[in-house]
Image (cartoon, helix red, strand yellow):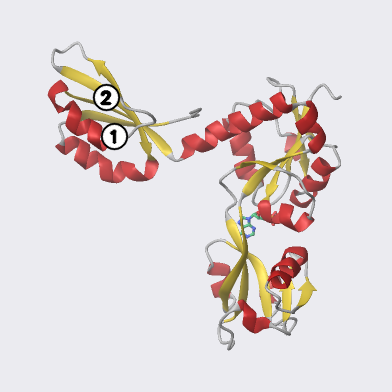
């Protein structure tokens, strides 16, 4: 068994920056060296292998890496039975079926007998076979969205996040093959032989992801207003209440959803809170 765990991550494309951000935020210290193949973590027995996003699954399935980060869409396409040990919450998109806006097609079932261009042929075949809708899949490695205009296909199956690329290309989504986000996968050998090391990676990455959509709130208030303020603050368990030097005054600390802060602050103020601070959280381990 290797003495250092190996984690394969993408070296190019849109998953690179959020993946590096997550690894650094989780506390791993490493230098990227222009994304050359391997970066050694100086504070953990972990090596990071930078490989093509599409190759992460092969590296992990073949045991060259113990775990890896890639898109759920890529994992589904690779058809290797690797367990997802954590969903990472970024790189969110869906693999959508789309047709030219003016096509007389309403639902995916209407595509029977038509040509569908995609860079996800395996997922596309599985999807249409599951619906018993026979289509001719046209595999492409890129520029899928221009296939209908070039006369290569009647429809496409492609990754969509906001839908603006579809719109720019005169296309309209009519269904979803799958939803995707970045995922952490683990190799079967690593799961059997080094479960504790994998668990700590899952825990550390998970703690950063859990903290991303929460804020730490601190405020002062007269002790007599505690019941009103507590009703507004769910917290992780219940808010912490600390006596202040000034008699009759308390400090209240709580964790709230980042999306709730906007609506919550005026209500806290109206309920008697003052000196309200909103702080980012680095990690949460519930
Ligand atoms: P890339 O290496 O830039 O081609 O993208 C690799 C992965 O990023 C895809 O396989 C998806 O998992 C993810 N991704 C997230 N949003 C999008 C999007 N709007 N279009 C394409 N890929 C996306």
Q: Quadrant of residue 110?
A: bottom right
Tell which residue pokes out farthest to the top in this image.
Answer: 245
- Across and down, in percent, residue 158 comes to 66, 67
- Across and down, in percent, residue 6 comes to 78, 32
Give the structural element (helix, strand or loop) at label 1: loop
- Name the residue rendered at 59%, 37% in the picture: 21
- Name the residue rendered at 72%, 27% in the picture: 195
- Across and down, in percent, residue 185 comes to 71, 41
Query: CB atoms at circles 1 and 2 under 8 Å apart?
Result: yes
Q: CA distance from mark 1 to mark 2?
A: 10 Å
Of the two numbered discs 1 and 2 in the rendering, the one whose residue sits closer to the viewer: 1
Q: Residues within 10 Å of mark 1 (few under 14, many from 20)?
A: some
Vertical placement of 179 versus 213: above or below? Answer: below
Q: Quadrant of residue 145?
A: bottom right
Q: Which mark is residue 252?
A: 2
Q: Quadrant of ligand 1?
A: bottom right
Q: Which residue is mark 1?
A: 233
- Name the residue rendered at 70%, 30% in the picture: 198
Q: In the drawing, does residue 205 fall left or right of residue 189? A: left
Q: Nearer the viewer, residue 173 or 32?
A: 173
Q: Residues within 10 Å of mark 2 (few under 14, many from 20)?
A: many
Q: In the drawing, does residue 216 fall left or right of residue 92? A: left
Q: Quadrant of residue 262?
A: top left
- Across and down, in percent, residue 187 comes to 78, 38
Whichever of labels 1 and 2 marks the residue nearer the N terminus, that label is 1
């Amino acid at each position: 068994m290797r003495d250092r765990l190996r984690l394969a991550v993408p070296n190019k494309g849109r998953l690179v920056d959020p993946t590096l951000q997550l690894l650094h935020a989780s506390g791993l210290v490493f230098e990227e060296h222009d994304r050359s193949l391997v970066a050694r973590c100086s504070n953990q027995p972990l090596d990071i292998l930078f490989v093509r996003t599409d190759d992460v699954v092969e590296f992990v399935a073949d045991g060259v890496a113990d775990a890896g980060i890639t898109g759920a869409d890529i994992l589904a396409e690779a058809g290797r039975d690797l367990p997802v040990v954590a969903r990472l919450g970024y790189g969110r998109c869906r693999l959508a079926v789309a047709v030219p806006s003016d096509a007389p097609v309403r639902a995916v079932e209407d595509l029977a007998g038509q040509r569908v261009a995609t860079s996800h042929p395996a997922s596309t075949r599985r999807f249409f076979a599951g619906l018993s809708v026979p289509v001719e899949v046209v595999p492409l490695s890129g520029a899928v969205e221009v296939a209908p205009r070039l006369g290569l296909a009647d429809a496409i199956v492609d990754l969509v996040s906001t839908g603006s690329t579809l719109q720019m290309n005169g296309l309209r989504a009519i269904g979803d093959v799958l939803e995707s986000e970045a995922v952490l996968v683990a190799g079967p050998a690593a799961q059997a032989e080094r479960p504790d090391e994998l668990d700590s990676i899952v825990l550390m990455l998970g703690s950063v992801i859990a903290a991303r959509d929460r804020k730490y709130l601190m405020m002062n208030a007269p002790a007599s207003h505690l019941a009103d303020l507590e009703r507004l603050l769910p917290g992780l368990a219940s808010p912490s209440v600390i006596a202040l030097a000034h008699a009759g005054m308390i400090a209240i600390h709580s964790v709230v959803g980042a999306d709730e802060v906007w609506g919550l602050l005026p209500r806290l103020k109206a309920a008697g809170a003052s000196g309200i601070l909103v702080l980012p959280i680095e990690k949460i381990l519930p």
